[in-house]
Image (cartoon, rainbow, N blue to C red):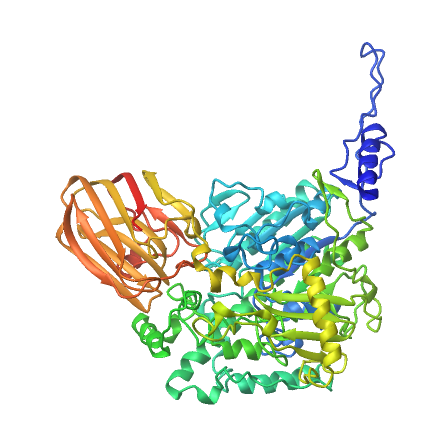
Amino acid sequence: MKKLLKIILTSILCITFNNYTNGQEILPFPPTPSASTAGLTMQTSTYQKRVEPNRLPKDAPNILIILIDDAGPATPSTYGGAINTPNLSRVADMGISYNRFHSTAMCSPTRAALLTGRNHTSVGNGQIAELANDWDGFSGKIPKTSATIAEVLKNYGYNTSAFGKWHNTPTELTTSKGPFDYWPTGYGFEYFYGFLSGEASQYEPHMIRNTTVVEHPETTQGHDYYHLTEDITEDAVKWLREQQAFSPDKPFFMYWAPGAVHGPHHVTKEWVDKYKGKFDGGWDEYRKTAFKKQKELGWIPQSAKLTERDKTMAGWDEIPESERAFQSRLMEVYAGFAEHTDHNVGLLLNEIKNQGKLDNTIVFYIWGDNGSSAEGQNGTISELLAQNSISTTIQQHIDVVNQLGGLDVLGSPKTDNMYHAGWAWAGSTPYKSTKLVAAHFGGTRQPMAVSWPKGIKRDKTPRPQFHHVIDIVPTIYDILDIQEPQVVNGFTQDAIHGVSMDYTFADPKAEGTRKIQFFDIMGSRGLYYDGWFASTFGLRKPWATGLPPGAADWDPENDTWELYNIDEDWSQANDLAKKNPKKLEEMKSMFLTESAKYKNLPIGGGLWVPILHPEYGPSTPYKEWNFTGRIERMPEFTAPRLGTFSNIVSMEIEVPKNAEGVLYSLGGFAGGLSCYVKDGHLCYEYNLFEINRTQIKSKTKLPEGKVNIEVVSRLVSQARGAMNITLKVNGTVAAEGKVPTTITTFGFTANDCLDFGSDLGSPVSIDYYDNAPFRFNGEINKSYVKYLD
């Protein structure tokens, strides 16, 4: 009640006494009143131009947050890894580094927590946006009661921008028709260029500028090819130059979050070949080498122990000799991709330096929104096979690679490759586990370098205080002397959960101020409290194929918990659960208290869609659709699920002489389906993640003139079962075939689309790959899609 009265009183003061209000309580600030005095006439009036007050400290710093995707602590050379990261080292050498800084263990949750300063479930992001559900903590929507730092800084006078991966908009709201309230521009970013989903092809992404779907350039950085990381770097440099030219009196806030090094691992051969042969010793050997280097650098304590590989994860000696070259090359691609990403960070830093602003720019360079990803499982040429729980053999992948041109095709537009989970585990040295495991630091501990030459003295001593991504926002507010606003855009604000880290800037030995922090990703959970960490692995092993056994009957109360004294046991190597059961029970009770406090209930709520109820997965609420003319770039998660459910596609088209081109396509070259005309014949392809391509072709050519096309798809059995395909021309069966295996409700891609009249983005079919987008040379009048079951 007292808080409410305070807000009401402050609102009255803002209206009545504009010159005396404490604007930090309520945002936006009230308009600056006129400095002129109006008389009856202009001759009797006094004119004086109003001066907008400066809300920021004198010479307020610029702010750059760099967030790398899916990168573990033992990958960068800066901190003991084998991947060359000169620009991460550059930031570290200009400032300080943190070796006990933490993420949530997953993409969307970390980003939401980072940008708001609140715990991930308290802002509706207990799960990735594509798998959100109706529980408050897992809705996929950052509430307006938890304003982002961009919204606050914009009100204080910063120019704000975001580039690259967003991943905090519910999938059903990602079409070009919005609504845009939950897009970056609805969260305080004045400018956005990137993609909204969790991942994208680096060569053929579906891109957004502000609230408009745009085509990306044909080439980037002077090359004869396009690459997404290079594109967002060029665009960010352009924005920096325009910001300097148009608003030289304003500081900037930039959030630069590339899709790299999330799957698919895409980078050109010149970057990959830098690492040729460097990983031939395998992931077990890499762990030993990285561990030794980490200690030599003083990055981890000499007392730290190297944890053991999980018994369910394959060792390098278990990989057949015939498959090792494939597995090594997958890691070489990842390494080249990571170095290429760091190189582009350097281009950003160079631009800021050339503008004379680097000394007064705070750079937060966070190496990973979670640990390295094991979602490639056994190594793959098409990484969404795992999300669709489709089992394959490595030899099948190698066979496809050989058909496409050999190992050099890995990293190219023709594969959506991702490395073996063993490499992800190696990238998390010395810790246990990987991304998606919130119980172990292999999923949550991220190296971070912070530089600000004007405000932070260079110091090589790692900061060992326990901190979390929610601590970035209050740190920035502390530096700028910004009071946490109580009301933003009319919404009473939720409390910020982070604590400022600025006390560590000058003193690496300062006592840590974060005393408690909970973690939970899909039931893998843990609690830090004053030097102790209690955790339980949960239901799902990210590196294991298929659905976990007993998923339907999983009861989190039966999970086995672990207990660690992490002040003495850096890497969670010594489980004290049996030796100290009283402490463990205390920590478990505290975890439940934190879960209730931060909307992390029900426990395992993030499993509702992917494991327990896939029928509630990402899909449109519609059962039938009418399309007129050519339709382009309908995001797959909002489009008809043509490869999943029984359906009919009926099209009224006008066929010219020598007809060619795509009638409709969904997905991309690494997975999708397409109906097209080639050499006058009606064709259909169901591309099951490149492992199997079902192609159906009419015996006779299409007649010229007005033609009705029907594609009838009927599931023979449930999800991942067979599907019968019938092609009809003017009501007569023209061809039939059977797709042996279909996808689940997750989809073919995360970022590609449904197109009518062409195949934009990544081309689905190998038949027209070199002729993409293979636009239909006739007319498409009307198209009708309906689910049959």
Considering only vertical position in the picture, is 166 above or below 322? above
**Quick one: 616 or 759, which is closer to the camera?**
616
**Quick one: 87 or 325, which is closer to the camera?**
325
Name the quadrant of the N terminus.
top right
Work out whether residue 100 can be spotted: no
Q: Is residue 283 left or right of residue 619?
A: right
Can you give x and y, in whole percent of width and height, for residue 488 in the image?
72, 41
Residue for point 71% across, 81% down: 297
Q: Quadrant of residue 437?
A: bottom right
Can you give x and y, in whole percent of width and height, for residue 376 in the image?
46, 72
Residue situated furthest bottom in the rendering: 317
Work out whether residue 694 can be spotted: yes
**Quick one: 4 or 221, which is closer to the camera?**
4
Q: Quadrant of residue 245?
A: top right
Q: Quadrant of residue 324?
A: bottom left
Can you give x and y, in whole percent of width and height, for residue 208 in the image?
50, 47
